[in-house]
Image (spheres, grey):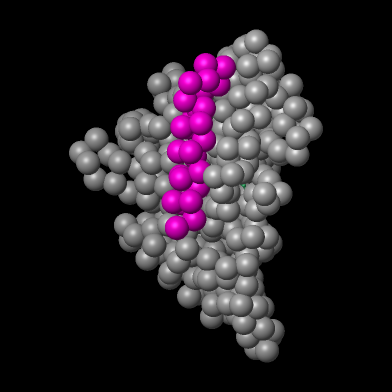
């Protein structure tokens, strides 16, 4: 059996190795490292993949994408931004960096995504935006979130870093790719994401042409034309080598997603009768692209299971052990333990198992056998 990795990028690379080396060698020959034509090609290809007349503005990473999105929407220090308490820190980090105020909302215990029923009650006249995060690869419930945003004149910034390629279905049966529903979205091409490059990379997605122009200006030092700066920007670019790699990987994205879904279904099947664990919930309004396969444990120790799996060379990880309202850096509102009980409980009970495109049935069975063994001993 091949060694089990949390994410196996080495095996995935073998299939595209020749294409990657050829593409990188071409860029070296041309020495066109920044803003090369390949960045434009990738932009167009990703726009075509996402559809819905989306416009892509590439940038240096997913964190920058969220920051530039907020700058582009004109959010000002003191403005409030609503975001889930249970997510990766980057979302709250850029809110704080821009002098904005994060207002946290608890998550739904089944989907791990923002509980939209708790949004309206915390909106104040200073609230300007909602950032739903499509955590672990499944869309937040966008339709009611968009309705609340419209009613209160708020912007919606989708954090699609973990869910590129996921699809949201509206009540009337139409569907949109994640990242093309809100006013703007930020995504990441960090190597372990569902569409990953071989370094840092990111992009913004919007259907608003004017906003796209502003976003690309901000990402390039606020330049209107060379050496003319109308607005304050940042230096955040996707380099040509990463764009070339992404261009090679983009045609595989649906196949990669299918492989993740197949692994997830097999895990589901193996865990079917185990009452100590809850397998990932499938919402009716979104498919799941399984950036992570995350279990919720009931009555067994999460850390005990993690240590046991490590002892038999099975990696597993806790995303995320501390909800944002209890992180020192982002607790700007005097939040206390007990205020977001679902987020707090998930932080203690979730465990993500190996999930990537290269898992085979032998590995999945080995992992599941050990999870089951631990759960049955621990009760
Ligand atoms: C990865 C990630 C980011 C940040 O992306 P980087 O490219 O690492 O900066 C933001 N939000 C979420 C939910 C993520 O998973």
Residue lying at the far left in this picture: please name it: 172
Q: Is residue 151 visible?
A: yes
Residue 245 image offset from top left, x and y in percent: 59, 70
Q: Give the side of residue 44 with respect to residue 345, left or right.
A: left
User: Is 72 one of the magenta-colored residues?
Assistant: no
Give the dominant element type of the magenta stretch: helix, strand or loop. Answer: helix
On the image, the x and y values in percent for residue 233 come to 62, 60
Q: Is residue 325 visible?
A: no
Q: 189 or 370: which is nearer to us? A: 370
Task: Say which quadrant the C terminus sits in.
Answer: top right
**Residue 58: x and y, percent?**
54, 64
Q: Position of residue 271 (x, y in %)?
A: 51, 27
Nearer-the-camera pick, 198 or 17: 17
Residue at the farthest bottom position:
29
Instruction: Give the quarter of the image for residue 34.
Output: bottom right
In the rendered view, does 266 fall on the left or right side of 34? left
Q: Residue at x 52, y 35 (%)?
A: 267
Read off the magenta span. Answer: 255-280
At x 66% / y 63%, what residue is drawn?
198
Task: State left or right for residue 372 relative to residue 270.
Answer: right
Q: Quadrant of residue 312?
A: top right
Quick check: 267 above or below 1? above
Please determine whether, in this image, residue 131 is positioned above or below residue 298.
below
Image mark count: 0
Q: Looking at the image, which residue is at 63% across and 85% down?
A: 26
Determine whether 216 is above or below 141 in the image.
below
- Residue at 43%, 41% in the rendered image: 288
Is residue 177 depicted above or below 299 in this figure? below
């Amino acid at each position: 059996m091949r060694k089990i990795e949390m994410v196996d990028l080495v095996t995935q690379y073998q299939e595209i190795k020749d294409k990657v080396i050829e593409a990188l060698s071409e860029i070296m020959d041309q020495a066109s490292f920044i803003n090369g034509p390949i960045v434009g090609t990738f932009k167009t290809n990703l726009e075509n993949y996402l559809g819905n007349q989306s416009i892509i503005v590439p940038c240096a990473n997913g964190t920058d994408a969220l920051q530039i999105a907020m700058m582009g929407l004109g959010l000002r220090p003191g403005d409030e931004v609503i975001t889930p308490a249970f997510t990766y820190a980057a979302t709250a980090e850029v809110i704080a960096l821009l002098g904005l105020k994060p207002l946290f909302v608890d998550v739904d215990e089944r989907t791990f995504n923002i509980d939209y029923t708790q949004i309206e009650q915390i909106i104040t006249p200073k609230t300007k935006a909602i950032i739903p995060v499509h955590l672990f690869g499944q869309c937040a419930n966008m339709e009611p979130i968009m309705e609340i945003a419209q009613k209160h004149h708020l912007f919606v910034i989708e954090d699609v870093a973990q869910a590129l390629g996921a699809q949201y279905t509206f009540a009337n049966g139409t569907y949109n790719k994640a990242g093309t529903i809100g006013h703007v979205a930020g995504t990441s091409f960090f190597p372990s994401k569902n569409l990953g490059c071989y370094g840092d990379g990111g992009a913004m997605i919007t259907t608003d042409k004017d906003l796209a122009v502003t976003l690309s200006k901000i990402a390039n030092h606020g330049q209107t034309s060379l050496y003319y700066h109308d607005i304050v920007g940042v230096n955040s670019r996707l380099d040509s080598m990463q764009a070339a790699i992404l261009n090679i990987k983009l045609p595989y994205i649906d196949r990669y997603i299918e492989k993740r879904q197949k692994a997830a279904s097999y895990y589901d099947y193996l865990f079917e009768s185990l009452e100590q664990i809850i397998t990932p919930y499938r919402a009716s309004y979104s498919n799941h692209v399984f950036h992570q396969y995350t279990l919720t444990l009931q009555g067994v120790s999460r850390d005990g299971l993690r240590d046991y799996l490590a002892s038999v060379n099975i990696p597993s990880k806790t995303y995320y052990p501390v909800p944002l309202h209890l992180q020192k850096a982002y607790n700007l509102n005097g939040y206390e333990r007990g205020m977001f009980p679902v987020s707090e409980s998930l932080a203690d009970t979730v465990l993500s198992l190996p999930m990537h495109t290269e898992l085979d049935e032998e590995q999945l069975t080995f992992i599941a056998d050990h999870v089951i063994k631990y759960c049955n001993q621990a009760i």
